[in-house]
Image (cartoon, rainbow, N blue to C red):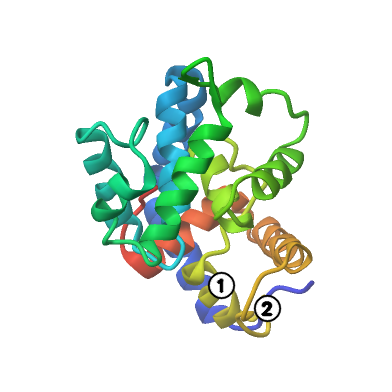
Amino acid sequence: MELIKNHKALYHLKNLYRLKKKDILARLEEFKTVLSERNDEEIFIELAFCILTPQSKAQSCWEAIRKLEDQDLLLSGNAEQMSPYLHCARFKNKKAHYIEEARKLFMHDGKISIKSRISTFDSIYKCRDWLVNNIRGLGYKEASHFLRNIGFGESVAILDRHVLRNLTMLHIIEEIPNSLSRNKYLQIEKKMAAFAKQLHIPLSHLDLLLWYKETGEIFK
């Protein structure tokens, strides 16, 4: 794949990276400490957040997660109890059920046990496939988001609408797909990784950079 011909867009992107590289590095370093320094309940909180985010604003979803924590519902409440706190999310009732089901999946002897399950995989891609296949409401974007937020973002892309829009503008892909099957997701992820390599910007950095370019913030 050749570099895009829009040199102005490339210059702007590289210049933006120079300006925000320090902040991006700091955020990614923070993510890398999550799995080792936080407990299973805190890891589950990250998972629940990523279940909420499809077609919803990330900041608002994080605020909703914090409200569920404050009400002691995230780790013990049922879907009907959680749903009223999820107005920020589209399909809030379904997502409340997804969170409850995910919690049951990782519940052993009355405690959340998610870190040990993740550590059984010898490949981040196998782990992502397992998450998608076993947790309702979690697609490849959300599973990648979760893995990035707990420190495994080096080789996966979070293909949300902001990133896809930029990949289209940069002519890395022809158009934003109506849906993302596993094969389509992996194809676009591969193209984005190749583009990142040509720019000499790590894939995880490019992901956050494109998010910042669209939203003006480096969030979760």
Check disc 2 and give the amino acid type. Answer: Ile
The residue lying at 66 percent from left, 50 percent from top is 132
Q: How crowded is mark 2: few (under 14 residues within 10 Å), some or many (20 or more)?
A: some
From the viewer's side, name the closer residue of 17 and 63.
63
Q: Earlier in the sequence, mark 2 or mark 1?
A: 1
The residue lying at 64 percent from left, 56 percent from top is 140
Asked if 69 appears above or below 10 in the picture, the reply is: above
- Residue 178 at x, y = what percent? 62, 81
- Residue under pointer 1: 164
Residue 173 image label: 2
From the viewer's side, name the closer residue of 81 and 9.
81
Instruction: Answer yes or no: is residue 17 visible.
Output: no
Q: Are marks 2 and 1 in contact (CB under 8 Å)?
A: yes
From the viewer's side, name the closer residue of 91 and 16.
91
Quarter where residue 95 is shown: bottom left
- Residue 186 at x, y = what percent? 75, 61
Quarter where residue 1 is shown: bottom right
Check disc 1 and give the amino acid type. Answer: Leu
Q: Is mark 2 on a helix, strand or loop?
A: loop
Asked if 23 appears above or below 212 in the picture, the reply is: above
Mark pair 2, 1: CA separation: 8 Å
The residue lying at 74 percent from left, 43 percent from top is 125
Q: How crowded is mark 1: few (under 14 residues within 10 Å), some or many (20 or more)?
A: many
Instruction: Answer yes or no: is residue 131 visible.
Output: yes
- Residue 19 at x, y = what percent? 37, 55
- Residue 75 at x, y = what percent? 37, 31
The residue lying at 71 percent from left, 42 percent from top is 130
State the residue lying farthest toward the top: 109
Asked if 52 appears above or below 74 in the picture, the reply is: below
User: Total marks drawn?
Assistant: 2
